[in-house]
Amino acid sequence: MFSGPRDSIDFSTVRRALVVKLRHHGDVLLTSPVFTALKSHAPHASIDALVYSDTADMLTGHPAIEQVHGIGRQWKELSTAARLSHEWKLFSTLRSRQYDLLIHLSEHPRGAWLSRALGVRHAVAPNISSKPNFWKKSFTHRFAQPLNARRHMVEWNLDALRRLGLQPAPEDRQLMLVAGAKADAAVEQRLQALGLDGQAFIHLHPASRWEFKCWPTERTARLINALQARGLRVVMTAAPSEDERLHVTRILSQTEQAPVNLCGELSLKEMAALSARAALFVGVDSAPMHIAAAMGTPVVALFGPSGEAQWGPWMVPHRVVSSADHPCRPCGIDGCGGGKVSDCLVTLPESRVLAAIDELLAARSS
């Protein structure tokens, strides 16, 4: 029978827990099973999250989370007085919650001083050998870093709970994202206006904040042309950033017939509601790919320098399309030689993406 580590904690004594993830949108969404598993094991506990404010929608509405606290990325650009005012207000709020447990899920230094300043009884963080003693001594527990890149980030996040003596159940490991009634209604109205209410469509999100993860625009355009030639409707989305808008403009300039273009027009919650209604999601390694997986939508994901074993679609029917001609991948480098262009994606033919789409659509209809 499993007994856990010798220094396992007694979760029955944990009244309030704070889970900290100060990273990007996809990273935050991949922590959602931590809240599910912790609440399942300690249903009496109040569980909060601390994230960057712009990523909060990845967790708001999660049934296991009581409060989501946010840190503004723009605080560092404010005057010293204004920044300190925001920091003091946040700290006062966190201190008033009287946490017993802090779960820190990144290398961010804030976790160490929060562990000390909040006076938590138990605190767990990654065991990072390069960190100074201040970091190492700030936590009662540290969980091991994977020795290779074959462990998915969801499991890595859940390792924090395993280190404390909690073994997550299989049913608690799924991603959780709640779009909400407002986003559902807004997307339903848009689809009705577009003549897509109740109609099958493919959700295509071709861009990423990281250029080296993107597929060439001409290949994406040819994929759209091929799908639409088969009578499949394509709804395209992108972030409202200038880089992604430019990427989409280049794609659209090469299509024979423009797909439905919702680029820059949807909130994160609305994108989740859209994905939930799609027959299939197609995109690169990005937060929208994880959003689609969280909504239970089958995913075709294009991977280049990043590794699908660590970052691939989680617990959803999917196909990963990657190059077999580049044994150097996944290299984790921002383009070959750091040049922002990844040969393993540039050479990836649209025929392989189409084949993956066909396989998943056939599986869904059978």
Image (cartoon, rainbow, N blue to C red):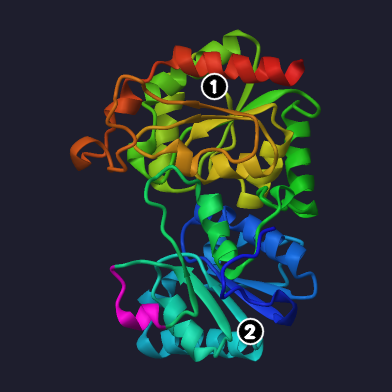
| Side (left or right) of 43 relative to 222 | right
**Going by the image, does 331 lie left or right of 293?**
left
Q: Residue furthest front?
A: 1
Q: Amino acid at mark 1?
A: Ala
Q: Residue at x 49, y 83 (%)?
A: 114
- Disc 1 designates what residue? 258
User: Residue 129 location, x and y as percent?
Assistant: 31, 67
Question: Dot 2, crowdedness within 10 Å: few (<14), some or many (≥20)?
Answer: many
Rendered image quadrant of residue 20: bottom right
Answer whether residue 136 is magenta in the image.
yes
Q: At numbered mark 1, what does the secondary structure look like: helix, strand or loop?
A: loop
User: Which residue occupies the foreground of this view, 34 or 215?
Assistant: 34
Q: Residue furthest left?
A: 337
Q: How many marks?
A: 2
The location of residue 81, given as percent across then percent down, is 40, 91
Q: Amino acid at mark 2?
A: Tyr
| Residue 99: mark in rendering | 2
Q: Which residues are magenta?
A: 130-137
Choose between 353 and 85: the one closer to the eye. Answer: 353
Q: Quadrant of the N terminus?
A: bottom right
Residue at position x 29%, y 39% in the image: 331
* 50 up-or-down from 239: above or below: below
Q: Quadrant of the C terminus?
A: top right
Residue 223 lies within the magenta run: no
**Is residue 58 something that shows in the picture?**
no
How many other residues sit within 10 Å of disc 1, few (<14), some (14-19) or many (≥20)?
some
Q: Secondary structure at mark 2?
A: loop
**N-terminal-most mark, 2 or 1:** 2
Q: Is residue 121 visible?
A: yes
The picture quadrant where one finds residue 164 is: bottom right
